[in-house]
Amino acid sequence: MIDDRNVTAIVMLCQENENNQEVCYQYWPSASNALVTGEYNITLLNENTNNRYIERKFEVKNNNTGAKQSVTQFQITNWDSTGEVKNPQTILMIIEEMYRTQRKRGNTSIVVHCSDTVGRSAMFCAAATTINKCKTEGVIDVFQVLKSQRIQKPGSVQTVQQYQGIFQIVLTYLDSFETYSNFTK
């Protein structure tokens, strides 16, 4: 998929193991070892661990064509499977880094995943889309964003807590402008 869709950023919203159970296969190599899978050779170029996320850069090489693709992966490490948002600032930082990486490389594709594809990843996509619409259109409508998202991915956002989490992320984004606001509460 990385090679086929020209993916340059991956947002991983889960750990490999959660609640003593493997929920995501480690699809990147450890340290300086290369991972060979089918016709692809994956090499880890760099890994930086921050307080709440890990940023990895790796290269995917198609051994048949020789084509190489540089990929940046952002793995949020403090978002559990319930979808409870404990630190929305981390999610906002990853949204900004994801878009920055995408713009730097020519508006290429982004992959967002978690362990079940309908919880945290759906929340992340809904929050990122809502924030993007706020920036470009001046509109904030989480309900319509999620309604549209559910047409493409039925079952997105499964609980009230997850739905509230989207609002929490968006409100944290809006609160970051409070210092510049001309309005009082």
Image: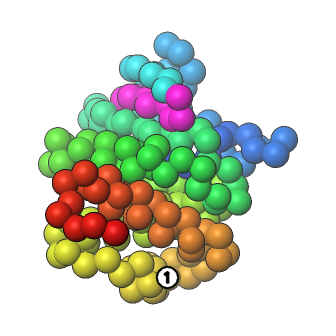
Along the line of sight, which residue is nearer the eye, 31 or 104?
Answer: 104
**Crowd band around label 1 with a 10 angstrom C-alpha radius: few (<14), some (14–19), many (20+):** some
Along the line of sight, which residue is nearer the eye, 127 or 22?
Answer: 127
Quarter of the image where the C terminus is located: bottom left
- Measured as percent of width and height from the top left, residue 74 is found at 44, 39
Q: Residue at x 41, y 78 (%)?
A: 142
Q: Which residue is mark 1?
A: 150
Amino acid under disc 1: Arg
Q: Residue at x 18, y 43 (%)?
A: 105
Magenta highlight range = 51-59
- Measured as percent of width and height from the top left, residue 12 is found at 52, 46
Q: Is residue 66 above or below residue 159?
A: above
Task: State whether the magenta stretch is mostly helix, strand or loop.
Answer: strand
Q: Is residue 175 above or below residue 156?
A: above
| 54 inside magenta stretch | yes
Quarter holding residue 128: bottom left
Q: Residue at x 44, y 46 (%)?
A: 89
